[in-house]
């Protein structure tokens, strides 16, 4: 429990720090850091129930992308402002590091195992981002086109 809390605080700090480097406005920095902390919470929950790296990465990335899209709609700014800090906890740095170390040490089986897990994690993240981005894009287009069509027909939207 204490270890999980430490990870959440570190994730918030890392995402907040990335937001500073990324030059996010002060009013959105806490939301950016919160996205990283919430993504870490989802990661910790998913790690308890899912053993497969690609599925875990996919679902966690979908959460981060959904958080970013919701915050972007709320704040009326691009979703990347919240997406980039929110995905900081998902970056498989340990797998990249272990892959590089085992490559240098010429430990081919371990290097290939780490490289495979890293690739699967990155593929899962990519698919998660694409799914949510596509969904929200078409949702926006549908609502915009529906509003335009109703305007052209001089009708009111039914509630």
Image (spheres, grey):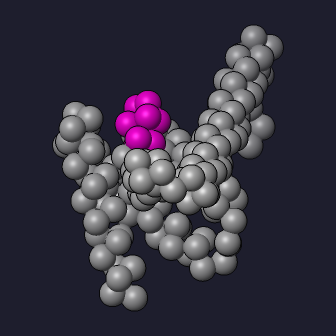
> Residue at 42% across / 53% down in the picture?
105
Instruction: State the image coordinates of residue 36 (x, y, percent, origin top left).
Output: 39, 57
- Residue 151 is covered by the magenta coloring: no
In front of the other: 75 or 4:
4
Instruction: State the image coordinates of residue 80 (x, y, percent, origin top left).
Output: 44, 34
Q: Is residue 155 left or right of residue 85?
A: right
> Residue at 77% across / 37% down in the picture?
158
In front of the other: 119 or 104:
104
Image quarter where the C terminus lies is: top right
Image quarter where the N terminus lies is: bottom left
Q: Is residue 149 left or right of residue 20?
A: right
The residue lying furthest to the bottom in this view is: 1
Q: Look at the image and tell me whether residue 147 can be seen.
A: no
Q: Is residue 131 left or right of residue 129?
A: right
In front of the other: 67 or 118:
118
The quadrant in which residue 55 appears is bottom right
Q: Look at the image and tell me whether residue 107 can be seen.
A: yes
Instruction: State the image coordinates of residue 24 (x, y, percent, origin top left).
Output: 26, 37
Q: Is residue 158 left or right of residue 66?
A: right
Magenta segment range? 76-84
Residue 51 sits above or below residue 123 on the image: below
Instruction: State the image coordinates of residue 119 (x, y, percent, origin top left).
Output: 61, 46
């Amino acid at each position: 429990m204490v270890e999980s809390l430490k990870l959440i605080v570190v994730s918030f700090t890392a995402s907040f720090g990335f937001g500073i480097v990324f030059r996010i406005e002060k009013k959105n920095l806490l939301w950016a850091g919160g996205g990283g902390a919430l993504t870490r919470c989802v990661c910790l929950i998913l790690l308890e129930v899912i053993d497969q790296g690609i599925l875990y990465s996919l679902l966690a990335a979908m959460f981060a992308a959904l958080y970013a899209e919701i915050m972007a709609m709320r704040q009326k700014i691009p979703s990347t402002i919240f997406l980039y800090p929110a995905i900081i906890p998902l970056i498989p740095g340990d797998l990249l590091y272990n892959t590089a170390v085992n490559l240098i040490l010429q430990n081919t089986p371990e290097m290939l195992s780490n490289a495979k897990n890293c690739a699967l994690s990155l593929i899962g993240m990519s698919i998660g981002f694409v799914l949510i981005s596509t969904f929200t894009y078409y949702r926006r287009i549908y609502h915009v086109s529906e509003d335009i069509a109703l305007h052209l027909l001089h009708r009111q939207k039914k509630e």
